[in-house]
Amino acid sequence: MLHDILILLLGLVLLVVGANYVTDGAVAIARRFKVSNLIIGLTVVALGSTLPDLVVCLESAFQDKPAIAIGEVLGSNTFDLLLVVGIMGIVRPLKVSDTMRYQDLPILLIASAALWVAGDSVLFDGATHNIVNRSSGVMLIIIFIFYLWFMILTSGKEKVTASLQQSPHTEVITGATSSPAVQKMAGLKKQPWYSWVMVAAGLVALVIGGNWVVDGAGGFALKVGMSQGMVALTIVAIGNALPDLVTSLTAALKGASGIALGNIVGSCIINALLSVGLSALVIPLKADTIGFVDFFTLAGASALIWLVPLISKNRSIGRVAGCTLVLLYIAYMTYTVIRG
């Protein structure tokens, strides 16, 4: 069992490192080809933050472990929306912009509801078990394409440029370097081939990391008697989402929590639509151990985060709402662990 845990943890590290390498390299390449900041922000940066989840989902599908795919997305999104946003609200009341209230958060609710309809076959189709079949996967991908098209039409260049400046994936080299070694590294990063090497190395890390996460999670579940879906909802999902918690908490402490909230919402939308949709095209995602409570919790979290700033006087997610979100996550995790 120790071997499975070690493989799982190393895989999670490789996923984070690989996603950063791919994103940094892809941004540099896109800028070299004079791609606009708008397109870079809506594609490379947005997709880069969800690469670990997407890779785990696809690897799970290719290895015929579909419960890990659907469980990872549900668990990661629920972690982000309840625990991460809740902690951000506790640290500092989270002001929600008009664009977020009337555009992004409603789209998040639509994406979560679409995933619920696609996956809860027992409730909506009267089936004997839950499954995201290929036709449902196509539906999710179509909704994602419309979402991307809508964002390109409605997003302004200034907004995306500001997000890129705050993004952890955006690298800025300013001032004089302190040593010849640092100067040499800065010179290498400016070389055209360096960006391609970063992308290639990142992709290799993602593939290896995805394999290790799926293998480690499957082996751990087998040895401790837990279902693969439960391991994905808890260990795999939390491991993949921990960087979001650290980044968002740092942003909240620095007063830039609005940007962190935008990244979380965008990541959850892409996870629910693209990650699950593509994985379902590879193999129908059977999720026998994942049911109504899991889908309802995610949809409910999306609805709460949308409704709270709508009804609050200062249009924000404050400390009371933050505490409520955190307590809801603790209750859900307690139920998940007891359920096994």
Image (tube, grey):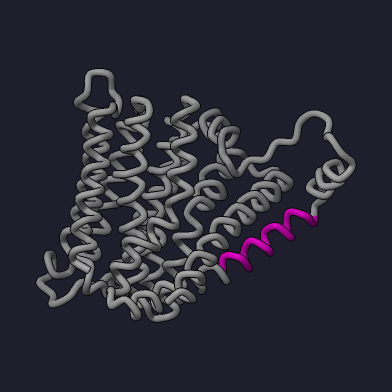
At 27% across and 48% down in the image, what residue appears? 110
Count the labels in the image.
0
Q: Which residues are magenta?
A: 193-207
**Which residue is situated farthest in the front direction here?**
2
Does residue 70 sit above or below 31 in this rendering?
A: below
Q: Is residue 195 left or right of residue 64?
A: right
At 13% across and 70% down in the image, what residue appears? 122
The one of 159 and 289 positioned closer to us in this rendering: 289
Quarter in which the N terminus is drawn: bottom left
Residue 281 in the image, given as x and y percentages of width and height? 38, 73
**Which residue is situated farthest in the left direction here?**
126
The one of 93 and 35 positioned closer to us in this rendering: 93
Q: Quadrant of residue 237?
A: bottom left
Q: Is residue 38 left or right of residue 196?
A: left
**Which residue is situated farthest in the right direction here?**
180
| Residue 137 seen in render | no
Residue 213 in the image, given as x and y percentages of width and height? 47, 69
At 57% across and 50% down in the image, what residue appears? 44
Quarter in which the C terminus is drawn: bottom left
Residue 304 in the image, given as x and y percentages of width and height? 22, 39
The one of 300 and 333 positioned closer to us in this rendering: 333
Q: Quadrant of residue 133?
A: bottom left
Membership of 73 in magenta stretch: no
The secondary structure that dominates the magenta segment is helix
Does residue 210 sit above or below 302 in this rendering?
A: below
Residue 244 in the image, given as x and y percentages of width and height? 45, 46
At 32% across and 65% down in the image, what residue appears? 71
Q: Is residue 106 left or right of residue 188?
A: left
| Residue 173 seen in render | yes
